[in-house]
Image: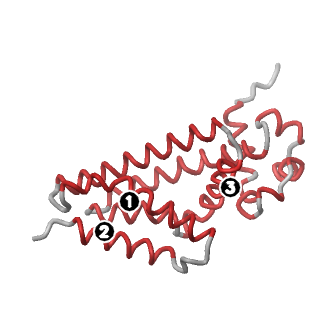
């Protein structure tokens, strides 16, 4: 009797077997042969599931973001204010818990910037829209609770982009020493301007 392989699960298993390799090495330094050896499979088996090493980054990002989102939902449910929730969102860019995910995300961003991969661009668009909507929801809850002024809804996209912009600046310049302090100071300043004065 032939063995039935769950191709979706096998693809995830291969990607996860390579996670540490991708987290701890530059994508440009990795070859499909190295990746296959690390996963304990043949180079041909890699190509049964992935077109190239960039596809593995994409799969890892999908897996890791799904887990990250589950953890974030739990943390957001425990927060009381819109400002606390926005700071939880910002933690992605500096917390120890998301270090490995950030390393994969950096590779994903560089692939997106250097190549025209519509599948990855579509994925990034879906993620952007999802996290932007999540930010809007947090801001709207703050407005509904009378924590922040109604016009705050117009800065939701800016708040969402703040973390990403500073993350890129931190990784491409010497302009930001402490990303956590910088992000939190900016969030505090923004909320000082939008909080309902009592």
Residue furthest bottom in the image = 177
Q: Identify the residue at image location x=32%, y=73%.
A: 188
Indicate the quadrant containing the N terminus: top left, top right, bottom left or bottom right: top right
Considering depth in this image, is 76 or 150 the residue closer to the camera? 150
Q: How many marks?
A: 3
Q: Looking at the picture, does residue 79 appear above or below residue 52?
A: below
Q: Which quadrant holds residue 105?
A: bottom right
Asked whether disc 3 touches disc 1, contact meaning CB atoms under 8 Å apart, the reply is no
Q: Nearer the viewer, mark 3 or mark 1?
A: 1
- Residue 159: give its label: 1
Is the residue marked by circle 3 packed among few (<14), some (14-19), or many (20+) residues within 10 Å? many
- Residue 190: give its label: 2
- Which residue carries the number 3 mark? 107
Residue 107 place in picture, x, y as percent:
68, 55
Asked whether disc 1 touches disc 2, contact meaning CB atoms under 8 Å apart, the reply is yes
Instruction: Measure how far apart labels 3 and 2 are at the Cα level.
Output: 30 Å
- Residue 110: give its label: none
Residue 21 place in picture, x, y as percent:
77, 58
Q: Identify the residue at image location x=31%, y=62%.
A: 79
**Secondary structure category for the residue under label 3:** helix
Is the residue marked by circle 2 packed among few (<14), some (14-19), or many (20+) residues within 10 Å? some
Instruction: From the viewer's perspective, tell me whether residue 195 is left or right of residue 105.
Output: left
């Amino acid at each position: 009797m032939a063995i039935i392989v769950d191709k979706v699960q096998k693809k995830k298993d291969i990607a996860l077997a390579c996670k540490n390799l991708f987290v701890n090495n530059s994508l440009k330094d990795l070859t499909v042969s190295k990746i296959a050896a690390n996963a304990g499979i043949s180079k041909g088996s890699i190509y049964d599931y992935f077109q190239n090493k960039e596809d593995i980054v994409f799969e890892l990002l999908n897996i890791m973001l799904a887990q990250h989102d589950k953890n974030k939902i739990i943390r957001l449910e425990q927060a009381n204010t819109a400002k606390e929730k926005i700071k939880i969102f910002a933690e992605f860019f500096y917390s120890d818990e998301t270090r490995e995910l950030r390393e994969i995300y950096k590779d994903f961003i560089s692939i997106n910037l250097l190549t025209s991969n519509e599948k990855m661009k579509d994925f990034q668009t879906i993620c952007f829209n999802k996290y932007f909507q999540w930010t809007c929801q947090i801001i709207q809850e703050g407005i509904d609770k009378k924590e922040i002024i109604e016009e705050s809804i117009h800065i939701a996209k800016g708040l969402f982009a703040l973390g990403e912009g500073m993350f890129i600046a931190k990784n491409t310049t010497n302009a930001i020493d402490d990303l956590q302090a910088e992000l939190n100071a900016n969030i505090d300043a923004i909320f000082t301007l939008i909080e309902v004065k009592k």
